[in-house]
Amino acid sequence: MQVIVAPSILACDFARLGDEVADVTRAGADWIHCDVMDGHFVDNISFGSAIVEAASRHTDRPLDVHLMITNPDRYLDRYLPVAASVDIHLEAEADVPETLARIRAAGRKAGLAINPHTPIGSIEPYLGQFDILLIMTVEPGFGGQPFREEMLPKIGAAAELRKKSNLDFHITADGGINVATARQCREAGADVMVAGTSVFRAKDRAAEIAALR
Ligand code: DX5
Ligand code: ZN
């Protein structure tokens, strides 16, 4: 299975956002992961659509916009023009089927994200309605947290569901991903590795991205 490496710009030097996005693009990033936080759904505020739009001007890679916000339906239209994929949280207050459908109607990949406490069974009603299943391997809100190993069985269960339902959605592991934990997630069935700290703090970002793959 082809592994996709998606560096999270939450870990970049925001004072040099454009250079940082261009640098990880040159270093081999497949996607650019943009962690949008509203200070309500999670206890942190990161950045909004103007910053995501600015980042998009410094890369030719697809932007994977992760909306950790309470009302993704309300802000969706501001991200669709620059995003290749938009991940909304099952725990958010939006109408999930309707919001996923709107993302797809705009020709983007629709992602469904679930927090560590949310059981994998909760996504079954939405099978077929998403192109990416984003499994949080840390509590959402901050980069640099330790990987939660107890999420590995959940990744395995997601891969089982994908096989059983004969679907081919991506499975993203998001949070605390480094070379060692990426291997564990890949073996469990994940194919997209979101990595913030491990890439942006690496001495050699190209080597780190290659090793994550
Ligand atoms: C956390 C974000 C993650 C995080 C990953 O809420 O969804 O994408 O930025 O950062 P690291 O790789 O540092 O855990
Ligand atoms: Zn994320």
Image (cartoon, rainbow, N blue to C red):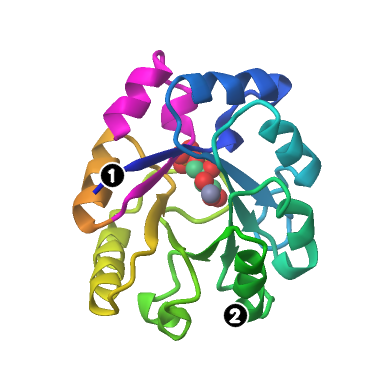
Q: Residues within 10 Å of mark 2 (few under 14, many from 20)?
A: some
125 vs 206: above or below: below
Q: Looking at the picture, how far across and down is residue 122, in whole percent?
A: 43, 81
Picture quadrant of residue 153 = bottom left
Identify the residue at image location x=30%, y=71%. 162
Q: Which residue is mark 2?
A: 97
Going by the picture, which residue comes out furthest to the top? 203
Residue kind at label 1, given as amino acid type: Gln
Q: Residues within 10 Å of mark 1 (few under 14, many from 20)?
A: few
Magenta segment range? 190-213
Q: Residue at x 44, y 20 (%)?
A: 27
Judged from this view, the residue extending furthest toward the bottom is 125
Q: Dot 2 lies on which element?
A: helix
Is the residue 42 above or below the residue 19 in the image? below
Q: Residue at x 62, y 74 (%)?
A: 101
179 horizontally vs 104: left or right: left
Whether residue 12 appears in this view of the structure is yes
Name the amino acid type tagged 2.
Answer: Pro
Question: What is the x, y in percent for residue 141?
Answer: 59, 51
Q: Residue at x 26, y 66 (%)?
A: 159
Question: Does 210 lie within the magenta span?
Answer: yes
Task: Tell me the distance, in whole angstroms, between the alpha carbons under discs 1 and 2.
Answer: 28 Å
Q: Is residue 144 visible?
A: no
> Which mark, by number, is residue 2?
1
Q: Is residue 151 left or right of residue 32?
A: left
Queried whether the magenta region covers residue 15, the answer comes back as no
On the image, which quarter does residue 86 sit in? bottom right
21, 150: nearer the viewer: 21
Is residue 103 placed above or below 198 in the rendered structure? Answer: below
Q: Position of residue 63 (x, y in %)?
A: 59, 43
Q: Earlier in the sequence, mark 1 or mark 2?
A: 1
**Residue 72 rendering spot, x and y as whole percentages:** 71, 65
